[in-house]
Every structure is written in C-alpha cells, then in structure tokens.
Image (tube, rainbow, N blue to C red):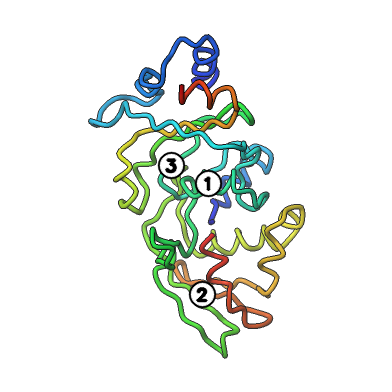
Amino acid sequence: MTSYLAKFLRRIRRNSIPLVAALAIPPVVAPGNADAQTVLTVTQSRDPQNLDPIDTFRVACSSVASSIFDGLVLRNEDLELAPGLAPSREFLDDDTRIRFHLRECVVFQNGEPFNAEAVRCKFQRLLREVGTAGPQRANYTSIEAIEVVDDYTVDFVMNQPDSVLITKLSG
Amino acid sequence: MIVPPQDIEEVGEETFDMHPVGAGPFQVVEYTPTAGLLLERFDGCWSGSYWVVGCRSLLVFSQQRVRCCLVR
C-alpha cells in the first residue's frame, strides 16, 4: 500500500501541487466534522529522527513531541507553569517528597488508561537501562524512587531537594 | 512526557521510537525519518484547549526541497 506521505512527496517533487492545493489534499481521515479535511502543513529545519521523548533532546523532536505527548506539568502560552496531567502537587518531608495528584479519566491515544502506574513506569524506564542510552536521564537523577500511593496519586522520593525539577518536568 | 507502559511492552522500543503513543492532542499516523510526519487529531484528548488550532491533521516536513516547494 502506498503511504499518504509518499504520495504527497511524489506530487510535490513533480511540482504538480501549489501550496493551496497541498493544503486541500483529502487526508486519510474520514470526513465528518466541518474541519475534517483541514491539513496544517508545517516545515522545520531538521527532522526528529526519533519520536520517543526519552531518546532525544533535539528541538526538532520536542517541536512535534509537544503535540503528541503531555507531561505532568505544562507551560502555557505566556511560558508560565500550568497544570498538565497532574493538576496539583504537594512538597512534603522538607521537599524530599513531591506528591502529584493526577487527572482522572485521561486515556492515551491507544485507549490505555493514564494513572500513577504509567507515571512510575515512565520514570523507571528513564532512570534504568533504556534511559541510560539517551541524554534525558542526567536531568532526573535527583529522583530516588517513584512510589504509587493510589491510582491517581504518585510520590517522587528525592535523594536531595531539586529546585528545578518542576521546570524540567514541564518539558 | 508520559507514555503508555503496556503499549511499549507490546510493540517494543524500536517500533515505539517511530510510532509512539501519547496522551496529547495529536497522534502519529505515519512517520518516515527524513521524509515526513503525519499527525491526526486525537479526539479523546483530555484537554480541549488545543482545538482552537481547528485542523484535523498536521503534516511536518524538514527536507529542504520540500520546504522550498511548499513556500513557493
């Protein structure tokens, strides 16, 4: 089966589609909503090469990753910290324990539920063997362990207070 | 950025690198390194604030030739 991307690129190389037509190409999605046919075409100077957020630090990846993934904390349009998948947090035990209260009823794009276990697995993956191959791990070594309190509460147990951890979590 | 643990377990690290799953507003339909990336809106996303973008799909290109063709 010829992919949508391959067909699109072939037509561009043949110079057969000007910009306006390129934006109007029927996408692979089924029509239904009023904006179902709308395709926003974005160009950037570098290709991400790898879309897994723990494998890379590249701007080329994070520019698209912020559309695919959400973090516990986000930054809003004014660059202020804003609630993400964790709407609130508490600093306990002299800042050596950060308790995140997680948003309920969030699902991943494959239907898998988002919960404290997903958060624990993500940081375990980052701090253990998979993460050691990438550049992100060094930013999170102040985390000693991730403890699941209940389905929607998770504790970051720190080996030392980390005043910029929340900033780092916001991507 | 939180990722789904069961999915990574099932598809493996290499597949996840090219076709990852998140909880954000757009999901990966197709990615071919250096060729391009096609994302489609994820209607089940917890946050409605992104829908002001008003588009169904995002196409991301980085090849110089393609970029030049698109802005001509």
Q: Chain of mark 2?
A: A
Q: Quadrant of the N terminus of chain A?
A: top right
**How many angstroms separate mark 3 from mark 1 (CA)?**
12 Å
Q: Chain of mark 1?
A: A
Q: How far across and down, in percent of the image, does residue A125 sit?
A: 67, 58
Would you place residue A51 above or below residue A123 in this image?
above
**How many angstroms separate mark 2 from mark 1 (CA)?**
33 Å
Q: Amino acid at mark 3?
A: Phe
In the depicted view, which residue is nearer to us: A7 or B44? A7
Q: Which residue is mark 3?
A: B26
Between disc 2 and disc 1, the foreground one is: 1
Q: The residue tagged with tag 2: helix, strand or loop?
A: strand
> Is tag 2's residue or tag 1's residue first in the polypeptide sequence?
1
Q: Which residue is mark 2?
A: A149
Q: Chain of mark 3?
A: B
**In this picture, residue B41 sits left or right of residue A97:** left
Q: Residue furthest bottom?
A: A94
- Please indicate, yes or no, whether residue A15 appears anywhere in the rendered image: yes
Dot 3 and dot 2 residues touching (CB under 8 Å)? no
Between disc 3 and disc 1, the foreground one is: 1
Residue at 45 percent of width and 62 percent of height: A74
Mark 2, residues whose alpha carbon is within 10 Å: few (<14), some, or many (≥20)?
some
**In this picture, residue A85 sits left or right of residue A133:** left
Q: Which residue is mark 1?
A: A63
Residue at 30 percent of width and 29 percent of height: A36
Q: How far across and down, in percent of the image, does residue A149 sit?
A: 51, 74
Q: Amino acid at mark 2?
A: Val
Q: Quadrant of residue A102?
A: bottom left
Between disc 3 and disc 2, the foreground one is: 3
**How many angstroms separate mark 3 from mark 2 (CA)?**
30 Å
Q: The residue tagged with tag 1: helix, strand or loop?
A: helix
In the depicted view, which residue is nearer to us: B33 or B72? B72
